[in-house]
Image (tube, rainbow, N blue to C red):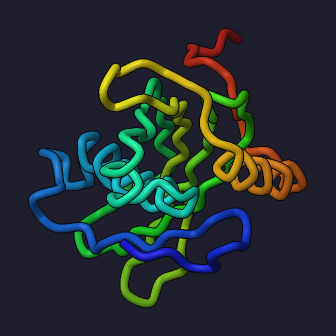
Amino acid sequence: MSVNNILEYPLRINGENVEKKWLDKNGHMNVAAYIASASDASFELIKELGVDEKYRQQKKDSFFTLETQIRYIQEIKENATLSFEARIVDANGKLFHTIWLHYAKKYNEIKYLAAVSEWIYAYVDLESRKVKPYPQHIAEKINANKIACSKLKPVERQGQPLLIRKK
């Protein structure tokens, strides 16, 4: 994975090409691959917030995922190239809420929105395994992303729980 447009928001992250082993019995990317690829992208986002491997080793702090939800919009097939857009939409000093737009592109086709996922992350002391406030330098980066992303059109159903719509 690699990050595009560092210091620009929303953060854009280039992912990998979808391999055959990522497909399910229906011939498209399986649920585990969606979560795993977005999780990999999450580590790029967290690194951009200042929490890389060196930071984890020295400070003994990191971010954990507390909750995730995903909506599938269009299937992703083998050899598609993944990319992600991260939008931080809420934060409280210990937790932050990110909307991930999962994009796919196959060969020279137009990139399309394939899925939207929402993630809640918590800043955690790796020794006590307890949630704690994140430092000011991280809060500043989270808030910069949140402010920039608040100017974007909200994603459909952003922040809403799973439900079966009644007619």
Give me the residue at 56% from left, 79% from top: 4
Direction top: furthest residue: 166
Q: List x then y, in percent, for residue 165.
A: 64, 15
Q: List x then y, in percent, for residue 139.
A: 70, 45
Give me the residue at 52% from left, 41% from top: 117
Q: Can the viewer see residue 157?
A: no
Q: Is residue 53 above or below residue 117?
A: below
> In the picture provided, is 49 more to the left or to the right than 54?
right
Taking depth in this image into account, of 8 and 162 the one nearest to the observer is 8
Q: Quadrant of the C terminus?
A: top right
Give me the residue at 28% from left, 74% from top: 17
Q: List x then y, in percent, for residue 59.
A: 41, 45
Q: Is residue 2 above or below residue 143?
A: below
> In the picture provided, is 108 more to the left or to the right than 50?
left
Taking depth in this image into account, of 104 and 100 the one nearest to the observer is 100
Q: Quadrant of the N terminus?
A: bottom left
> In the picture provided, is 94 more to the left or to the right than 83?
right
Q: Can the viewer see residue 53?
A: yes
Q: List x then y, in percent, for residue 95.
A: 61, 29
Q: Is residue 43 above or below residue 32?
A: below
Give me the residue at 72% from left, 28% from top: 92
Which quarter of the figure has residue 93?
top right
Direction right: furthest residue: 151
User: How many tags in the picture?
Assistant: 0
Which quarter of the figure has residue 148?
bottom right
